[in-house]
Amino acid sequence: MNFYSNIMKRTLHAVVIIMLAAITGASAQGQRMGQGQGQGQADNERLTAYKIAFFTQRLDLTPAEAEKFWPLYNKFSDDKSSLQAERLSLMRNASQNESKMSDAELSATADRLVQTYADEATLVSSFNRDIKKVLPPLKVIRLFQIENLYKQHLLRELNQRRQGQTGVQPGRGRFNQTESPDL
């Protein structure tokens, strides 16, 4: 029975990945036909589909888990990205304008920077509490590991592309593949 359960899970993963690839492919095809969005949006959609496949496969999410997981994770990611963007903006502004800023303004900027770190810690803690209601403890631990693995994978891919070391044909990058991501 366990053998058949594993086959069913693998089949489900393959179907999800193929559907995501088809949706992304249709979106990219529509864009090539002049239906609005630019290349950046198409790349972002392919990256999102790839991330979904990457996490779903490695977390071995059931359909019920995936249905509850993705809204929580997407909200968490968006909120975390907003805090990180604010922090980057504060640092960039201070770096560019430090000679024009008063000590009070510099102090307020430093305080706000520290607050973004505190807010991010609170966000992670809250997300951990909420995700434990959706996923078993082992998958929660794996989630944090997979996030790091995903970032490392993207950075490695980016570095290889910058150095021209990918053996990937134009238009057939890793984010366009219809098969599951492999690491």
Image (cartoon, rainbow, N blue to C red):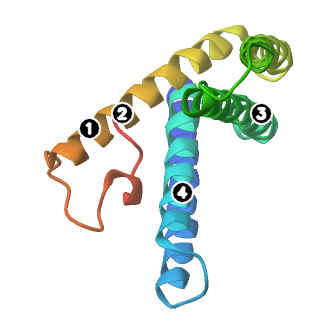
The quarter of the displayed image where residue 133 is located: top right
The numbered mark, 2 or 3, whose residue comes first in the sequence reads 3
The type of residue carrying mark 1 is: Asn
Secondary structure beneath label 3: helix
Q: Is residue 164 left or right of residue 38?
A: left
Q: Give the x, y percent position of residue 63.
A: 72, 41
Q: Which residue is mark 4?
A: 44
Cα distance between the residues tagged 2 and 4: 15 Å
Cα distance between the residues tagged 1 and 3: 27 Å
Label 1 neighbourhood size at 10 Å, few (<14), some (14-19), many (20+)?
few
Q: Residue at x 29, y 63 (%)?
A: 172
Secondary structure beneath label 1: helix
Q: Residue at x 17, y 48 (%)?
A: 166
The numbered mark, 1 or 3, whose residue comes first in the sequence reads 3
Q: Is residue 137 left or right of residue 46?
A: right
Q: Residue at x 73, y 36 (%)?
A: 82
Q: Which residue is mark 2?
A: 155
Give the label on residue 79, or none: 3
